Image (cartoon, grey):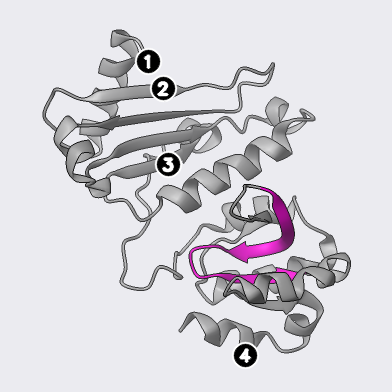
Amino acid sequence: MAGKSSFHTYRMMLQSESMIFDEPLFYGLYEPTSDLESMKLFVAVGPDAIQHGQKQSLFAAGCLFDSPSNREHAEFESAWNGYLRIYNLLQFLTNAVFATQEGKASNQRYQKPPTKEKPDIDKASQEEWDEIKDLIESDFHEILDVFAKSGLAIPEVGFELEDDNGEIIAESELSWPSLKIGLLVEDQLDYQDIFKDSGWQIYPIDEVLTNPGSFISLFD
């Protein structure tokens, strides 16, 4: 639970992003317990929103600490994956904003994810796509450039599909979980039927490399 000073700090920050909310609020601040201070996530929600299940009334602000020294840390890759998952989870909320430490150092404001009818289109900066490239094999960098130029949402790297008991039953190299679309590398092809049985549209990434247009049309 965040202290009062932390609450007022983030409250003022959210208001600077044109978010206005009334107290009282339940609020909390997530901070990693490991040696690497990789990110912080502040959330706040009112009692009425909880009672009536109004998820669009949740306020959230996340910041990834992507300094050069952090990027060299052994835990940074998993932290970056976690940050992407949080972004994918919260990106469609009206009152969610995200930033990186390097972006803030360049005087960039916290950014609201785009709100469009189609949840599959999210104009991401080239820097964000380049960060995705750092997490996958260089053989697939070219197709990422194609995805970026086509305006696709940033995919999640290393998505793990779980069964009803929370057990991991399959993994996808690149995925768009909200749309149930994913790409598999060679050593993941055995998971293809598992994803399809769960309602996913799943493809070998090697096939998409040769015909990216057909894959991109899934997002239209």
- Numbered-mark total: 4
Give 104 or 59, whichever is nearer the viewer.
59
At 63% across and 56% down in the image, what residue appears?
A: 163
Mark 1, residue position = 2
| Numbered range of the magenta stretch | 167-184
| Rendered location of residue 62, percent (x, y) | 44, 35
> Mark 3 to mark 4: distance in Å?
31 Å
Judged from the image, the secondary structure of the residue bearing numbered disc 3 is strand
At 44% across and 64% down in the image, what residue appears?
A: 122
| Rendered location of residue 165, percent (x, y) | 62, 48
Dots 2, 1 in contact, CB < 8 A? yes
Mark 2, residue position = 29
Instruction: Please name which of the two marks, 3 or 4, marks the residue nearer to the observer.
Output: 4
Q: Is residue 177 left or right of residue 210?
A: left
- Based on the displayed image, in which of its 4 quarters is residue 80 positioned? top right
Mark 4 burial class by Cα count in 10 Å: few <14, some 14-19, many 20+:
few
Check residue 98 in the rendering and tell me which mark sits there, or answer none: 3
Q: Is residue 78 visible?
A: yes
Mark 4, residue position = 214
Mark 1 burial class by Cα count in 10 Å: few <14, some 14-19, many 20+:
some
Sequence-first disc among 3 and 4: 3
